Image: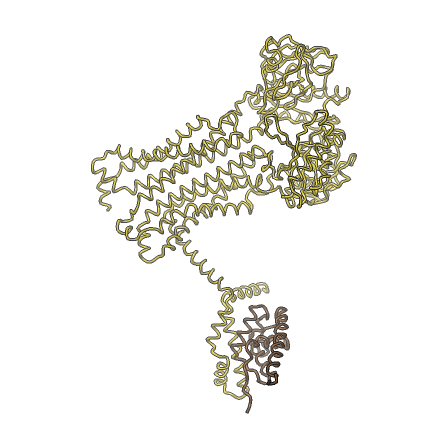
Amino acid sequence: MTPTPMGPVQGTLELLVLKSLQARGEMHGFGILDWMRRTTGEEIVVEDGALYHALHRMKKRGWVSAEWGVSDKGRRARYYGLTDKGRAALTEEEARWSRYVAAVARITGAEPA
Amino acid sequence: MIRLSRIREVLRAIVRSLDPSDDVDEEIRHHLDEVTDALEAKGLPRDRARREAEQRFGSVRRHRDALVRLNRRGETMRRGMETLRRVWGELRQAARGLARNPGFSLGVLATLGLGIGVNGAMFAVTDRLLLRAPDHIERPDEVHRVLSLRTGDDGAPSYGASMTYPDLDDLRTVSSFAAAAGYSGPRTRTMGTGAEAMRVETVGASHDFFSLLGVEAALGRFPSPEDDEVEAPPTAVLDWDFWQRNFGGAADALGTSIEIDGVAHTVIGVAPRGFTGVDLSRVDVWIPLVPYGMLQWGRYDFRESRGFWWMRLVVRVRDDARLAAAEEETTAVHRNARQEQIETGRYDPETRIVTSPLIAARGPLASDESRVALWLSGVALLVLLIACANVANLLLARGEQRRREEAVRLSLGISRAGLLRGAMMEALLLAGAGGVLALGLAHWGAVVIRDTMMPDVYWAGSAVDARLAAFMAGAALLAGLMAGIGPAVRSARADVAIQLQNGGRGDAGRRSRLRNGLAVAQVALSVVLLVGAGLFVRSLAEVRGIDLGVDVDRLAVVRLEVEGASSMFGQESEEERVANTALYEEAARIARATNGVQSVSLTMSPFGWAFSAGIRVPGLDSIPRLPGGGPYYIGADEQYLATLGIEVLRGRGLEAADRAEGTHVAVVSETMARELWPHEDALGQCFYHGEEEDTPCTTVVGVAEDVIRGSLQEEAHMAYYVPLTVDGPAPRGLYVRTTSDDAADAASALARPLRSFSPRVRYASVQTLREALDPQARAWSLGATLFTAFGVLALLVAVVGLYSLLAFDVANRTRELGIRSALGASKRGLLRGVVLRGVGLATAGVALGSVVALTLAPRVEQLLFGVGARDPLVLATVAVVLVGAGALASWVPGLRATGVDPMEALRAE
């Protein structure tokens, strides 16, 4: 049985996007999506529209910057980059995620009594 | 070009932040294109690839709308824009409505413009005098003046600003003060010499004066402690404007030498523009206090002596110190320092030292001008109130005319709030436009008041500044609200059914009660203003009419500033005395030869100077003390009494022969004769002039009328005239009597020759007596002029208000008047009806206003002169004028009432 692709765990989409931008530098929406898909081996699939929601939300919070530019295919595209505020948020989100994973692991790893 | 495209980009960004849908669309399109490309590359046909891309995106439509909403920066902003657009629309509608009725609109505009304008003009003055600390002072709340306070025999407090130099040293030891400084002046001195000489206003300021205030020099530096010492080389700091005028604003003014009263001063700095220290009068040159004291006294005694009361003190209070404690401490130090004087009975042991606000007009020593200005601001506010009442009345009247229109609009579904907003908008629009009109008026008015009424104040900058503009915007808004709120509420309360039924006449009775009330209030306020005007006009007339004893209009007084002359009286050497006497005699010859000069007199006591030597009278234990001080003596030649126009009542005046050595005669004033020899003839009596034992007795040869010494308000004093003897002190001035009734021309003709006839004369000041006295009458002339101007304005507005009220009523009652006319009412009866109503309203206003005026008037009493605050003549005149004006205002509408054609009126229904 091939595993079905998962959506991201609730509340982690932003973490994923920030991490992608940290890893790859400035990217447009499609680039982010494409990179995430390839990096996770298509394990995590994000609905395209939802990605843009996350991007615009973070833009409003000042975590990412957005600038119109021209893509390598010669198209006008909106490029996103990490701001200082975004970097700080990423650190925080990562820590939270680690705590979460650890907590989940403690529960799932518990021996039956 | 680059800049142009940059601008376009910025504009685009702004537009996009307002409407982000383009951005969102473009981004989604790009994304779909990329996905489609990728899918196509995997072998899907283009159209299937596109569909797949859209499917993966989720619902494009839904996401797009959600993203646009998310991005729309500030939903509030959009709503704000919408409101703005709606308000704009309402404003335009209001403007259209007003434009349809230009007569009404212009009338209201003018009324509000005047009302707001006079407030602006007064604000421009009081802001400087009363509200704002002098410029360039850091944390002005901490800076205080230091005054002495004594309690007079009658229990009234008496404040004094003059202090001695050692008092400043004392203050510097008081722990509550972060700093203490002293200054003296302004005093007019002469810069340069001879024909090029000019008069400059100088102030001596201790070196810490500037650091205390926290002011920085615009160029160079302020005096250092070394500049402010005994024997320090004299230095000077120039005022900014003075530097611009006389040095062209050149930086190399620093280091140059200027001669002030014959002493060379090195320029070390330029004060920042508009810096006037803690007072408001113009200063041209700042000089360190100790060298300045030397300039003033010719010696350095003032440094140690507690007898030279020549300077004022300021302190900066520590932010943790309490004022009361600081005053307590200072008083103790002050009394302690004067222990010896107090013990020997030469100093009042109860003297207290108190602080007073930096803004002089708020302290106990506020000038009369600033007190009057404060009253006038209140008066200006009354004018605005009257204007608002009038406008409210006009708006009400108009609202009634439009009752029907409004009822229709209401029934068509426009909300009452909308109707209210519309009416308010109209009032605010009028007030706003009135405010713009007022700005011009305020500027003009402020300039006139500043230049003519308060020329001593240094008005740096334009009359219209941001503060004034803000104030006037506020006043306009307030006026709009005050005038508009009543009528607006009325219009919104209109009852549709009633209005439509009876053709818009509605509850006319209630409304006209409100409007009558407004008209009465206007008249009442006008009464208050006109009573004020009357009181000040009478004061001014009294002041002008004071019998000064001398012919003020025909006299000029000349004073020479002589090179090397010591300024201390009685210090001159014999050589100096002879030379100065010769100089004045030469000046007198020149003056006599000048056109328009009738006679010239030499005197030891030019205007404002009188000496007191103490006298003894055989047979009298003590000399009566009069409130005006004295007895004063005036050393004069034989021309003196005739030149000044002082009448000799008995005996003779001084004669040329009296000037010979060894004659001891005097002419005494009427008061002196009466006080010293109440029961016998003063002629032939004798008294000892001066306190030396060996002087022979001086014989009284004449009695002259009483005259003033140098100011308009003087209390009784004794005076006597002694001949300027050949071996006595040199003259110190000349009186010139002119042939014409205005001494000004002759005075200006005299100035040139007198300034250049001798190299020893540094400067010759020629001043008419009028010029010398006018500043003393300024408070009354300020009050009289502006109270009258405002009062007449108020009267006009009130009369117009009354007129419009009646005219409107007549127009509204056409039908009723027509019927009454048809039923046989006489024209005279109709006229009488209208006029009586007008007079009735005016009378009610006069009655109300009189009560208010009588209640308020005593508060201005101390600003008046020679007239009681409840002067019946003033009150009666004002009452007659207003009732008369009321009758006049109702005459025209009354005539119109008689002209109503009954048929016409009935057919109109």
Q: How many numbered markers are drawn? A: 0
Vertical position of residue A56 compared to residue B889: above or below? below
Vertical position of residue B329 compared to residue B406: above or below? above
Question: Which one is nearer the viewer's eye here, B851 or B507?
Answer: B851
Residue found at the very far front of the displayed protein: A113
Q: Does the rendering let one see residue B197?
A: no
Residue found at the very far right of the displayed protein: B231
Q: How is the image coloured?
A: by chain
Residue B551's x, y, as percent?
57, 20
Residue B139's x, y, as percent?
64, 46
Q: Quadrant of residue B185?
A: top right
Residue B351's x, y, as percent?
66, 31
Residue found at the very far left of the displayed protein: B823
Residue at position x 55%, y 64% in the image: B10
Q: Is residue B830 left or right of residue B869?
A: left
Vertical position of residue B225 compared to residue B661: above or below? below
Question: Which one is nearer the viewer's eye here, B350 or B194?
Answer: B350
Which chain is the one coloured brown? A
Q: Is residue B422 left or right of residue B116?
A: left
Question: Which one is nearer the viewer's eye here, B550 or B412?
Answer: B412
Q: Does the rendering let one see residue B135?
A: yes
Q: Quadrant of residue B361?
A: top right
Which chain is the one coloured yellow? B
Q: Is residue B355 left or right of residue B101?
A: right
Question: Which one is nearer the viewer's eye here, B681 or B142?
Answer: B142
Which quarter shows the N terminus of chain B? bottom right
Q: Is residue B625 left or right of residue B38?
A: right
Vertical position of residue B836 compared to residue B754: above or below? below
Residue at position x 57%, y 84% in the image: A43
